[in-house]
Amino acid sequence: MLDEVNHRAKNSIQIAMSLLGLQMHATPSEEVRLELASAIRRLGSIATAHLMLNSQSTDEQLTSFRAYLTLICTETHQSLGGERIALIVDTDELALDTSRAINLALIASEALTNAMKYAFPGGRQGAIRIACHASGGRAALIITDDGIGFAATSRAGALGLRLVRTLAKAIGGEAEIDGTNGTRIEVRFNI
């Protein structure tokens, strides 16, 4: 029964991605195409999460966050053509419940997508670092880039950054976002 539910969920996500792709190719607006491409990437991250989490035993309630975060970030980086932008993922081995792991990976994917799209205009090269470390019952997910920051890009209130704040609250965490010297996003949460 569970296998059938998982199969249907996977198919539903694929159908949604295909429909958005058709709509993306049909629209004359470049702005709409970019937003639809972002939606497709978000669904792709959810599909990857679903696939990885369903490959675990049904008895497992905890997820290896290091492997999961690395997979999501690597796929996002590659899908956005990351040849000129280095990606460094450095995380402790944390065992997190699946809901928290998904939300944190979506935060990282969203921050990575924003950095790839906006932090390095005009073909600039740069680096994005994603780290997650724990100490004393608390952990911090930190995403930094050495790009232009968002004072220059005017993205401080953009959908992606609002999504980061919302996802941080959903896990009982808090997000600090600074765009003055490159961009730094820090999400602190209990483990």
Image (cartoon, rainbow, N blue to C red):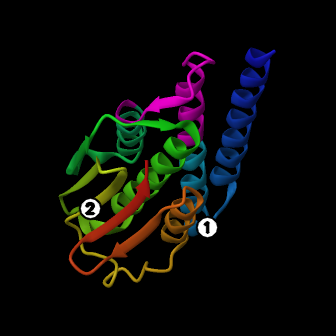
Between the C-alphas of marks 1 and 2, the distance is 31 Å
**Three-letter amino acid code of the residue under disc 2:** Thr
For marks 1 and 2, give the one nearer the viewer: 2
Write down the region rendered in magenta: 44-67
Q: Is residue 106 left or right of residue 74?
A: right
Q: Quadrant of residue 182?
A: bottom left
Instruction: Give the position of the N terminus as an image quadrant.
Output: top right
81, above or below 117, in the image = above
Residue 67 percent location from the top left of the image: 37, 30
Residue 3: x and y in percent read: 73, 15
Q: Position of residue 153 (x, y in %)?
A: 36, 79
User: Does residue 172 belong to the magenta stretch?
Assistant: no
Residue bearing the label numbered 1: 29
Residue 144 tag number: 2
Residue at left 46%, top 55%? 107
Along the viewing direction, whichever of 54 and 62 lies nearer the viewer = 62
